Image: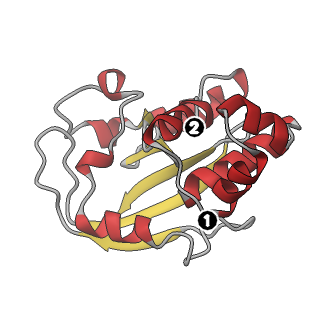
Amino acid sequence: MNEFGRALKRWRRLRGVKQSHAAELFGVTQATLSRWERGHHRASQKIADKLSKLLAAPLDSAGDAGLRRLVESSRLPTHLICDLTHRLLAASPARVADWRGSANELRGVSLWRFATDEIRAVEDCLADLGWYDEAAPSLTFWTESNRSEVVPIGAGVLVWERLQLSDGTLARLVTSTAD
């Protein structure tokens, strides 16, 4: 719930929404919303689904068109996902070359089910690594292959870079590099 809490707080601040109003939107008390934002309370699955829809990175504004174009024309094997939901926002031809589906078919689909054990382990400790700090570092780590035929991830080094989109939501640029 910590990623939802941080994203919810960021969403409220960017849009000038008070905790009390956000609590009304979700049908909870201000105290409950405060606990969500601090990561001290988990929301029900219904509320978590509603939060995901509200907080997911869209990459559909004119302000983000340049970013999409850069990713989709990159010669590097790279893709951009929503940092919260792992939905695909854009992918380079070098990344899509090994995929069974096209980038258009996978755009908007969460790639989380293709994550390796190493990716899941790094995701689990993002807060400890400072990922959610104002000046988020890029992360570089080794992953094994996922052996997927649909969205294969080869063994190698991944670089994650956190980017803020024009609406304030966060995206993750994922690039494969040589050892």
Q: Residue at x 42, y 55 (%)?
A: 175
Residue 159 vs residue 120: left or right?
Answer: right
CA–CA distance in space, label 1 to label 2: 16 Å
Mark 2 lies on residue: 51
Q: Residue at x 71, y 29 (%)?
A: 25
Image position, residue 49 (x, y; %): 48, 35
Q: Give the mark toward the camera: 1 or 2.
A: 1
Mark 1 lies on residue: 40
Local crowd size for mark 2, using a 10 Å CA cut-off: few (<14), some (14–19), many (≥20)? some
Numbered disc 1: secondary structure: loop
Q: Which image quadrant is residue 179 in?
A: bottom left
Reply above or below: 157 against 20.
below
Image position, residue 114 (x, y; %): 24, 48
Q: Residue at x 59, y 30 (%)?
A: 59
Residue 89 is tagged as: none
Amino acid residing under circle 2 = Leu
Local crowd size for mark 1, using a 10 Å CA cut-off: few (<14), some (14–19), many (≥20)? few
Query: Can residue 36 be seen by looking at this rendering?
Result: yes
Reply above or below: 79 against 119.
above
Amino acid residing under circle 1 = His
- Numbered circles on residues, count: 2
Reply above or below: 151 against 137.
above
Q: Are marks 1 and 2 in contact (CB under 8 Å)?
A: no
Q: Residue at x 24, y 37 (%)?
A: 97
Image position, residue 166 (x, y; %): 73, 35
Image position, residue 55 (x, y; %): 61, 37
In front here: 78 or 14?
14
Residue 36 vs residue 109: left or right?
Answer: right
